[in-house]
Image: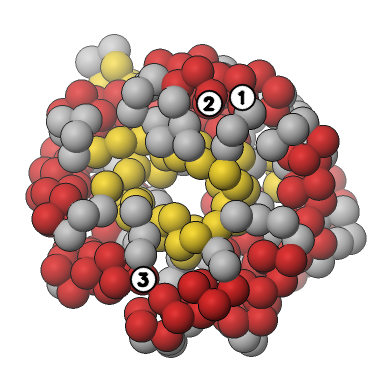
Amino acid sequence: MAFSVALQIYSVRDYAEKSLRSTLQKVKEIGYDGVEFAGLYGMEPAEVKRMVDEIGLIPISAHVPLDEMLDAPDKVIGDYAQIGCRYIAVPYLKEERRPGTDRFKETIKDIDSLAAVAKEHGIQMLYHNHDFEFKKIDGEYGLDILYQSIPSDLLKTEIDTCWVNVAGEDPSEYVRKYSGRSPVVHLKDFVMSGKKKPKQMYELIGTEPQKKEEEAKEEDEEEVFGFRPVGYGVQNFPSILTASEEAGAEWVIVEQDKPALGKTSMECAEMSRKYLRGLGV
C-alpha cells in the first residue's frame, strides 16, 4: 500500500511541551514520514518550517480550533501555509456547536467561509470527526449534512476511524462512502467494554473536566474505554487500510490521545509504526 504515514503530534504532546525539535527528531527516527500539528508550542511558523525541513519530515496537516481560525483567518491559516501544511482541519466542536443544536447551521457557514480562505492560501480544509456528529437530523447524520452542505473542493474528510466505530458504524465503509474526498484518514485504536458510551471518553482527549482522583482511579481499574497503539485494540486495520486505498487516501495519520499498556506516549507511537510496517505500510 502506497501510503505516507504521519503522526499527530498531540499523541506525544508531553514530549513536545518540553522540546518540539527533539520530539520531531524522534518521530522521524521511529519511522514516520510526516506530522500533523496541534499547536506550535510557542514557536514561530518560520522556526517550525526550518525544523521540519532540517529533520526531513513533511508537515502534512494541522488541527486548529474553529474559534482560533475565526478570530484571525488569514493570520492563522497563513501561518500554517508558511510552515508548508497541505491541509488544515477543524478538530473538534464545542457542545453548543454540534449537530442538533441551534448553532449547527452557523457552524457549517463558518467552516464554509474558512475553507474558502484556506483555498486562497493553497491549503485544503478538512473536518475531523468524533462520534457526536453521528446524531441524526431528519434521518441523516450531522456529519453527512456537513459534507453535503459544503462543496467537496472546499471541504474534504479526515475520517477518524476510532470515533466512527464508537458511533456504531463500520469505519471501512464510512471511508469508502467518501471515496475521492478522503485524502487523509486517521488511524486510532481503542478498547471499550460494553455498548454504553462512557463519559470518560472525552476526559481522555482533554476536552472535558477531569474526574476527581478517586473516581478516575476507580474507572482506570475497570477501564470502560481506553485508547491503544494502532493494532492493539479492536479495530480491523487491514480492512480500514484497504478501504483508505480504494477511497484514494494519500496519507494515514496515527493518533493516540492517551498512552496505554504502561508505555510512554512515544513508545506507543513507535508500536503503532511497527504494526503498520508489518502490514506493508
Q: Residues within 10 Å of mark 2 (few under 14, many from 20)?
A: many
**184 to the left or right of 200:** left
- Give the amino acid at mark 3: Ile
Q: Mark 1 — residue?
A: 240
Disc with the residue nearer the chain's start (2 vs 3): 3
Q: Which mark is residue 244?
A: 2
Element marked by disc 1: helix
Q: CA distance from mark 1 to mark 3?
A: 30 Å
**30 to the left or right of 130:** right
Q: Residues within 10 Å of mark 3 (few under 14, many from 20)?
A: many
Q: Quadrant of residue 148?
A: top left
- Give the amino acid at mark 1: Ile
- For the N terminus, the quadrant is top right
From the viewer's perspective, is residue 53 above or below residue 96?
Answer: below
**Residue toward you, 54 or 182:** 54
On the image, the x and y values in percent for residue 217 come to: 81, 61
Viewer-nearest of discs 1 and 3: 3
Circle 1/circle 2 CB separation < 8 Å:
yes
On the image, the x and y values in percent for residue 121 come to: 17, 60
- Give the amino acid at mark 2: Ser
Q: Which residue is rendered at x = 42% and y = 85% of the image? A: 47
Q: Residues within 10 Å of mark 1 (few under 14, many from 20)?
A: many
Circle 2/circle 3 CB separation < 8 Å:
no
- For the C terminus, the quadrant is top right
Q: Which residue is rendered at x = 74% and y = 39% of the image? A: 276
**Way the structure is coloured:** secondary structure
On the image, the x and y values in percent for residue 158 come to: 42, 39
From the viewer's perspective, is residue 79 above or below residue 128?
Answer: below
Q: Which mark is residue 83?
A: 3
Q: Which residue is rendered at x = 64% and y = 86% of the image? A: 18
